[in-house]
């Protein structure tokens, strides 16, 4: 396969990073774009010199198939996953899908089952797994005594997209946004043993600070236990508009503190030395490159977050939501 022919389904905010990647790859060709917003789909088509322009995935799939496409890139709203992945699977088209893959857990489980049955190459947009900083953390942890505390935080304001206004359309901040750090914890420590979470509302005033229908949690805290005496506390907050703390993970080992500043730098601190390491890579480019290589070679081993694995992070996010509602821990 000389060039991988791509269809872009969704040309909005997050798709921008993927399009930037593809502009720097000589072995891909964007042959079709789809987006309900005319300005976005026309801009994407112009960017890649593409003449196959569609209003949505249904129109794209009605005109494109395996004869014209090798893969699709899905960057759509959490509530818009109405047959997008299922049709790709039916057509035998590998796909990247941005997180959250959907806010319908049953749908995600069925998609994962069908992907596995078809042995289809997939990738989910957990970009942090491709960071050089994350590679350093994974290499460093085994050098120290197992166990310790992890503190993670993603705190800021309300993103300017409509689905954030209701928990039923975004899944809450832990599922929609902080799932990146949630997935990072799984990537570093494996599968959780339990999660207990609590949440609060009342800081953001509906009709004043947000829309009248706003009912997303202002902040939440999840306590997640892993094997080998590791306990992580992950906080999420979308109430702080003008200031924000350092977002990321702080891992306290018996003889080192690992301070991961979200997608920026990593500080390794011991009693005798402090090392500050800046990010050197474009993690989305590496995610996209791994996917393109997998499609070309039919070898998915370079993909760090296939759909089946990403589903486990989505399940953990929904388990935390379940704990918020019930007041009880969820055990795995």
Image (tube, grey):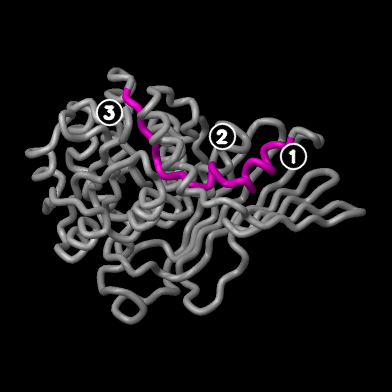
- The residue drawn where x is 18% and y is 42% is 82
Give percent across and percent down for residue 8. Answer: 25, 47
Name the residue: 49% across, 34% down.
304
Q: At which x and y percent is residue 234?
A: 57, 52
Which residue is nearer to you in this view: 172 or 324? 172
Q: Which residue is more in the foreground, 279 or 317?
A: 279
Is 329 left or right of 69, judged from the image as shown?
right
* Residue stretch in magenta: 120-141
> What residue is shown with label 3?
110
Across and down, in percent, residue 65 comes to 15, 32
Q: Is residue 189 left or right of residue 236?
A: right
- Measuring 17% from the left and 61% from the top, which residue is drawn there? 42
Q: CA distance from mark 1 to mark 2?
A: 20 Å
Residue 82 at least partly seen: yes
Image quarter of residue 27: top left
Mark 2 vs mark 3, CA separation in Å: 22 Å
Name which of mark 3 and mark 1 comes first in the sequence.
3
Q: Is residue 318 visible?
A: no
Based on the picture, tell me whether residue 129 belongs to the magenta stretch: yes
Magenta-drawn stretch contains 30: no
Tell me the mark number nearer the camera, choosing from 3 and 1. Answer: 1
Q: Are marks 2 and 3 in contact (CB under 8 Å)?
A: no
Task: Give the Cα separation between the discs numbered 3 and 1.
Answer: 37 Å
Q: Which of marks 3 and 2 precedes in the sequence?
A: 3
Mark 2 = which residue?
192
Would you say 306 lies left or right of 276 here? left
Residue designated by label 1 = 140
Q: Label 3, secondary structure: give it.
A: helix
Q: Main secondary structure of the magenta part?
A: helix
Q: Quadrant of the N terminus?
A: top left
């Amino acid at each position: 396969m000389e060039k991988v022919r791509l269809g872009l389904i969704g040309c909005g905010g997050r798709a921008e990073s993927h399009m930037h990647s593809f502009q720097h790859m000589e072995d891909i060709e964007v042959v079709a774009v789809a987006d309900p917003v005319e300005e976005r789909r026309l801009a994407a088509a112009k960017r890649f010199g593409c003449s196959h322009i569609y209003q949505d995935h249904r129109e794209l799939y009605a005109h494109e198939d395996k004869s014209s496409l090798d893969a699709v890139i899905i960057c759509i709203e959490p509530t818009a996953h109405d047959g997008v992945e299922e049709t790709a699977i039916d057509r035998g088209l590998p796909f990247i899908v941005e997180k959250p893959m959907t806010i319908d857990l049953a749908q995600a489980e069925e998609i994962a089952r069908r992907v596995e049955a078809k042995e289809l190459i997939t990738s989910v947009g957990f970009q942090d797994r491709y960071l050089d900083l994350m590679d350093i953390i994974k290499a460093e942890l085994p050098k120290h005594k197992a166990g310790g505390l992890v503190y993670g935080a993603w705190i800021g304001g309300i993103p300017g997209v409509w689905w954030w206004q209701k928990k039923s359309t975004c899944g809450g901040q832990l599922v929609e946004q902080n799932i990146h750090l949630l997935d990072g914890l799984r990537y570093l420590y494996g599968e959780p043993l339990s999660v207990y979470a609590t949440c609060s509302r009342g800081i953001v005033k509906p009709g004043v600070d947000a829309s009248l229908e706003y009912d997303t949690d202002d902040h939440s805290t999840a306590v997640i236990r892993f094997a080998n005496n590791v306990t992580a506390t992950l906080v999420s907050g979308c109430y702080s508009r003008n200031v924000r703390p350092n977002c990321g993970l702080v891992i306290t080992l018996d003889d080192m503190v690992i301070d991961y500043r979200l997608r920026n730098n990593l500080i390794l601190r011991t009693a005798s030395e402090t090392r500050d390491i800046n990010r050197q890579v474009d993690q989305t480019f590496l995610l996209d490159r791994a996917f393109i290589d997998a499609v070309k070679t039919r070898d998915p081993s370079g993909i760090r977050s296939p759909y089946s694995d990403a589903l486990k992070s989505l399940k953990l996010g929904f388990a935390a939501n379940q704990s918020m509602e019930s007041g009880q821990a969820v055990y795995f």
